[in-house]
Every structure is written in C-alpha cells, then in structure tokens.
Amino acid sequence: MAGGIRKPAVAGQFYPSSEQELKRLIASFIVKEPANKDVIACVLPHAGYVYSGRVAVETVSSMKIKDTVILIGPNHSGYGEEFSIMTEGVWQTPMGDVRINSDLAKQMASHSPSLKEDTLAHRYEHSLEVELPILQYFKMSFEIVPIAVFSGELALLKRIGKEIAQAIISCGAKDSVVIAASTDMTHYEPLEHAEKKDRLAIEAILALNEDALFENIAAQGISMCGYAAVAVMLSAAKTLGASSGSLVKYQTSAEVSKDTSSVVGYAGMIIY
C-alpha cells in the first residue's frame, strides 16, 4: 500500500478482474430500473459476486449514492487496529480509483478516540473492497471513508457510531454522506435454520435496534460476521435522523449452489 494506494486484494477471486467482465456481471444482476431513494445508510453483503452479487446490486441500485460513502465492515484477518480507519490514499479497483475523503476521515478520527489511523487492517480485507465496483457501476465519482471493525462491546460500538455521526454533522456533510455496513448473515447452517436466524437479525436491524440485534445473536448463536459494523452503522444512522428501514432482498447461497444443507445468508437493507 505504498504511496497511499490500496491495491485490490480479491479481484479475480470474489469478482472479475476485467473491467468489461465486471460490468457485464453487475449488469446481469439488475432486474429493474435503478431508483434514487435518499437513504442515510444501508446493509450490503460481501461474498463472491456469484453468491451475493444480486443482493448487493439490487440494494445499491435502489438508493442514491452520495458524494461520500462511509464503508464499515468486519476485519476478518485480525491484522491491524481493532477499529481501523484509513484517512488518506486511493483504493484501486478494475473500474478505476476511488479516493478517500481525507477531511472527513480525519474529523472522524479526531471525534472518536477509538478509531485509529491504520492501513494494515485494510490490506487484505475483502469486506469493503467488494462493495466498491458495484457502487462505481452506478456512480463513478464518489469518495470513501474505510473503517474496519474487529470486535467490541455494544456500548463502545454505539459510542463510536455517535462519534462518527457527530463528525459528519460538524463537517456539514450530513446530506452528502451515506453509510454502508458490510456483512454476511448466518454461515454454513442448514437452509431452514439460517433463514429462521437471519429473520430475527433482519427484524432487529430494520427496527434500528442494536440491543435486540445483539440479544438475538447471543441467544440464537447467529454467525453474522459484520454484526459489530452494523451496530456502529445503526448508532450513527439514528444520530443522523434515521427512523426506519426496509429489506430490499434476502437470499442464501443455496440459490446458486442448490445445496440446502450448508448455506450462507445475504441481506440487503436500506435505512432512512
């Protein structure tokens, strides 16, 4: 990541490395004319496009992509800081470069002592990277603030979310920012179990209720990898005035694999 350039880590694996092939694949997931709903935040999946791409594309195409997208996702690798924010640089994808909104990112780091400037957590992490080409397909010019979350107590996650929102407000950027939380849902369980567990998690998210989400995860053993990122997003979104949410699409890997014995769930939601 020398020179502030973050190279793609999973191009050619999670999604095509060719711009032409990538655009063709994304276009194949579009089932209706893109909408332009003004949203505060969203939830997007981050698996390989063959499995979760349709959910992500339908969700992104339903909303207005603003000038800055705050990407919050889990840190699968464990490298770097527990709460890692990149405040400078460029992320490259096969669709082109996406610049970090340094002013806003530095304001967030200043407002939230838990957010540490760090590149290591992002170097190999796929959960934010895979969202970028889909966002670029619908809007070529936007900036990002990448945040990777390793774990955290709910009270801390709520506080970080509020601090992120306060930084947005202090910069006068409330109307030009959308927050995207990246997560997959239940991992590697029978279809019936996954759908039941994911329904509980989705209901809590749509109710904008971080407490209910954490209670359901603990009580049901829901293996949702980005629950901490979603909690940060919900706290920030509510501070920015969010009052409701809706489910755009839910499906599992069984839609593609036809294997119902061990599935992963994918949900796309908008918060407004």
Image (cartoon, rainbow, N blue to C red):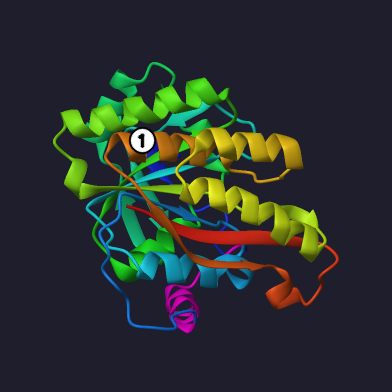
Dominant secondary structure of the residues highlighted in magenta in the image: helix
Residue 183, percent from left and from top? 56, 49
**Secondary element at tag 1:** helix
The residue carrying pointer 1 sits among few (fewer than 14), some (14 to 19) or many (20 or more) residues within 10 Å by Cα, namely: many
**Residue topped by disc 1:** 236
Query: Is 26 inside the magenta-drawn segment?
Result: yes
Q: Is residue 175 left or right of residue 263?
A: left
Based on the displayed image, in which of its 4 quarters is residue 245 positioned? bottom left
141, above or below 205, in the image: below
Q: Is residue 238 left or right of residue 149?
A: left
Query: Is 23 inside the magenta-drawn segment?
Result: yes
- Tell which of 230 and 141 is nearer to you: 230
27, above or below 43, in the image: below
Residue 116, percent from left and from top? 43, 22
Q: Residue at x 33, y 82 (%)?
A: 33
Q: Residue at x 74, y 58 (%)?
A: 194
Based on the displayed image, in which of its 4 quarters is residue 258 positioned? bottom right
168, above or below 54, in the image: above
Could you tell me if residue 100 is visible in this image?
A: yes
Quadrant containing the N terminus is top left
Q: Residue at x 52, y 32 (%)?
A: 120
- Tell which of 57 and 19 is nearer to you: 57
Based on the displayed image, in which of its 4 quarters is residue 50 positioned? bottom right
Residue 85, percent from left and from top? 41, 31
Residue stretch in magenta = 14-28
